[in-house]
Image: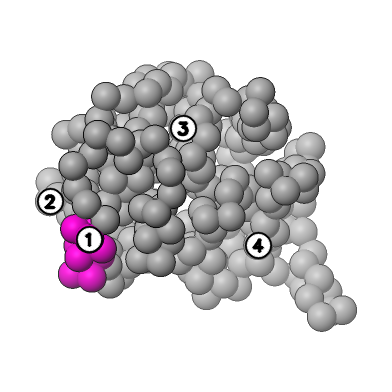
Amino acid sequence: MGKRAVSSGLVSTKPVALVIQHEDDAPLGYLGEWLADAEVAVEVVKPYLGQKLPENLKGYSGLVVLGGAMGVHDEAECPWLVEAKVLLRIAAQKQVPTLGVCLGGQLLADATGGRVERSDIAEIGVCSISLLEEAQDDELLSKVSNVGIPVLVPQYHQDAIVELPEDATLLASSDDCRVQAFRIGANVWGVQFHPETDKEIMADWLNSLDPARKGVSITNQEVMHDYQQYGEAMKENWSGLGKAFAEVVKTYRQ
C-alpha cells in the first residue's frame, strides 16, 4: 500500500509517488496532471532547498526523478545526488514504479551500472526519436506511437547515457543520442527527453545560462515556434506514457 497523504487535515489512502525535483525551473509539469488524474498523490522533495530525501522508499508507490542542469557526477556541488542514486538503486532492486526524466534517467543508469558522459551534441527544442521494436510490448511506450515512426519530443540536454546497465532494455533512440528510453525490470523506466515540459517551462530553460546552449544553432524563437506548432500534439501523444505510468503506480503493492 502507498503512504497516507494528508490534505486539509484529512487522511487520504491514495497511493503516493515521491518526486525529486532538482531545480525551481524543472517541475513536474504535465506529469503532475497525469498523476492527479489517476488519483495518485505526490510528495515533492526539493533537496536543493535543503529538504531532506527519505532514506528508503517504504510507504511510497512510485518514484519520479526530474531533470536539472547539473550532471550525474556533480556530487560535490549537489550532495543530494548521492542519496538520489541510493533511492534509484532501491527502486530498481525492489521494482518500485519509477520514472527518471533526463537527469533522472541518467542518474538511474549511473546508479545501476551504466555510464553517462558529456556529448559533443546537445539536443534542445523539439526533436524526433524512434521507438524500437522492444517498445511494442512495453507498458508505457506502447501507449505512445507505432514503432518505426519518428515521434516528436521536447529535449534539453547535452550529457548522455553512453552505456546502459547490463539488465536494461533499450526502448527508443535518436540519431544524436542512442539512449532515449530504457527499462529495468518491469517497473523502472528512464527517458532522456522531457514528456512533462510545456512551453512555459521550455521558455524558462531557453532563457537560462546553461552551457548546453553554447554551440547550438537553433534560436529561442525557432524553438518556441516549434512549440506553438507541435506543443499540443506532443502533450497528447506523451499523455499515453504519463497516464500509463500513473496506473502502474496506482496498482503497485509493496
Callout 3 environment at 10 Å: few (<14), some (14 to 19), or many (20+)?
Answer: many
- Residue extent of the magenta highlight: 221-230
Query: Where 216 falls versus 235 (above or below)?
Result: above
Residue situated furthest left in the rendering = 149
Question: Percent position (x, y) of residue 18?
Answer: 66, 52
Q: Nearer the viewer, mark 3 or mark 1?
A: 1
Along the line of sight, which residue is nearer the eye, 105 or 159? 159
Give the structural element (helix, strand or loop) at label 4. strand
- CA gap, disc 2 to disc 1? 27 Å
Magenta region includes residue 224: yes
Point out residue 154 in the picture as x, y percentages from the top left corner: 31, 53
Give the spatial CA distance, label 1 vs label 4. Answer: 34 Å
Residue displayed at 58% across by 39% down: 95
Task: Look at discs 1 and 4 and give the one toward the viewer.
Answer: 1
Residue at label 3?
106
Among the two numbered marks 2 and 3 on one chain, the one whose residue lies closer to the N terminus:
3
Asked whether the residues under the numbered discs 4 and 2 touch, taking CB atoms below 8 Å apart as contact, a structural biologist would say no
Q: Position of residue 243 (x, y in %)?
A: 44, 65
Indicate left or right for 235 with 84 as reference: left
What is the chief secondary structure element of the magenta stretch? Answer: helix
Residue 16 as seen in the image, left or right of residue 119: right
The Cα atoms of the two marked residues, 2 and 3, are separated by 25 Å
Q: Point out the tag, 4 or 2, that comes first from the N-terminus.
A: 4
Q: Callout 1, which amino acid?
A: Gln
Q: Provide the residue designation for mark 4.
A: 42
Q: Are marks 2 and 3 in contact (CB under 8 Å)?
A: no
Give neighbour class at mark 1: few <14, some 14-19, many 20+ (Cα, 10 Å).
few
**Is the residue marked by circle 2 packed among few (<14), some (14-19), or many (20+) residues within 10 Å?**
few
Viewer-closest of 228 and 177: 228
Q: Residue under label 1, please give it.
A: 221
